[in-house]
Amino acid sequence: MPQRFARPELATDEGGLWAMMDRAETRLRRSPFAIHDKTLHDYVQSMACHLGTEHCPDIRVHLVRTPLFNASMAPNGMMQVWSGLMLRMENEAQLAAVLAHEIGHYVERHTLARLRDTKSASAFGQFIGIFGAVGALGQLAVLAGMFSYSRDQERDADRIGVSLMHQAGYDAAEASKVWGNLFAEIKARPDGAGETSTPMFATHPGAAERMETLATLATTLPGGVTNQETWRARVAPLRGQWLKDEIKRGQHEESLVLLTRMLGNSPADVDLLVARGEVYRRRAKDQDLDLALADLKAASAQGTEPPETHRTMALIYRQRGAPEQARNSFQRYLELAPGAPDAPMIRTYVEELGK
């Protein structure tokens, strides 16, 4: 591990890059997408600090509410972790794998090398936009692809990342699982976009290659913890919003793979059942509405379901021409959430269905 980096003089080219990244970081702090949950921030910051060892004082974690799988680290120590990535982590060790990989790029100064190779000022501005989350989400993969790491750089970051995981006491075998889970999602996309649609893959080799490489590296470093329950407890307060963001993303096939995998680990999780039911309802193919109702009824049977459970059921019954069932479900929704923003509209539905 190299020693801590000294801040470059402002008059140098590198110093100018640092100043631009500092400004981008200021914008990121003020962004409406910044997650200001102190408990979660301090937890992830502590993880990054533990992984980064002597570089800890220079690593600054920023959590960003963006429903895509991505993390990045700028040469000045600014690290960005998106909520879509955190939603997909099954335990602390898996997040540690991603953080450690990005720290690997940082300590090898790979991103700085990429920036130095950028000849165009406008291209550099686009690159900073990626780190500052200021660009349109649909353009991120294209922009990130302009600055892809070399295979040798990726191998270095993988090697360093797995080593940092092991030194920090984590189970290095979890690194491969991150990419296996994500690969299962992207393979489900019906449009064939696959890995090209994921910002993380725009600057990394394919998931299949990464899985194999990481699994091989992990065999030489056995042992370690996953801290699954600790991770679940930390993200629990924000997971509901992240699930809603995932649904709104509109990638139904990817979301169904994700939610089905999560339910495999927690079959009785009410929020996951309701989320998958809503995705099935929105996709509405073949037997999707039957599958949606099965999930929603399973959630309702537990007695701790969120009000949205009954609204989604009502919409399905309404679509199927079952007015009495739709009306009853809408009324149950209003009983559980009388002050909901859409309550006036739902009351209109109830009146229409009663005629």
Image (tube, rainbow, N blue to C red):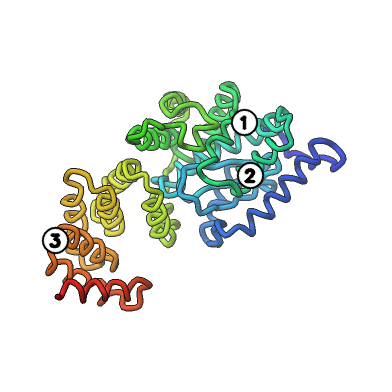
Name the residue at 47% across, 25% down. 217
- Left or right of 56? Residue 92 is left
Neighbour class for label 1 at 10 Å: few (<14), some, many (≥20)? some
**Location of residue 320 by image quarter:** bottom left
Q: Amino acid at mark 1?
A: Phe
Callout 3–callout 1 Cβ contact below 8 Å? no
Total count of labels:
3
Callout 1–callout 2 Cβ contact below 8 Å? no
Task: Point out residue 327 in the picture as x, y percentages from the top left corner.
Answer: 17, 71
SS type, badge 1: loop
- Disc on res. 129: 2
Task: Point out residue 41 in the picture as x, y percentages from the top left corner.
Answer: 55, 56
- Return the disc, 1 or 2, that comes first in the chain's sequence: 2
Q: Amino acid at mark 3?
A: Gly
Residue 20 vs residue 143, the one in the foreground: 143
- Tell me the quarter of the image containing the C terminus: bottom left
Q: Which residue is mark 3?
A: 321
Task: Point out residue 71 in the picture as x, y percentages from the top left corner.
Answer: 54, 42
- Left or right of 257? Residue 103 is right
Residue extending farthest right:
11
Mark 1–mark 2 distance (CA, rounded to whole Å): 13 Å
SS type, badge 2: helix
**Location of residue 189 by image quarter:** top left
Neighbour class for label 2 at 10 Å: few (<14), some, many (≥20)? some
Answer above or below: position of 280 versus 101. Answer: below
**Location of residue 253 by image quarter:** top left
Neighbour class for label 3 at 10 Å: few (<14), some, many (≥20)? few
Name the residue at 39% across, 53% down. 248
- Return the disc, 3 or 1, that comes first in the chain's sequence: 1
Q: Which residue is mark 1?
A: 147
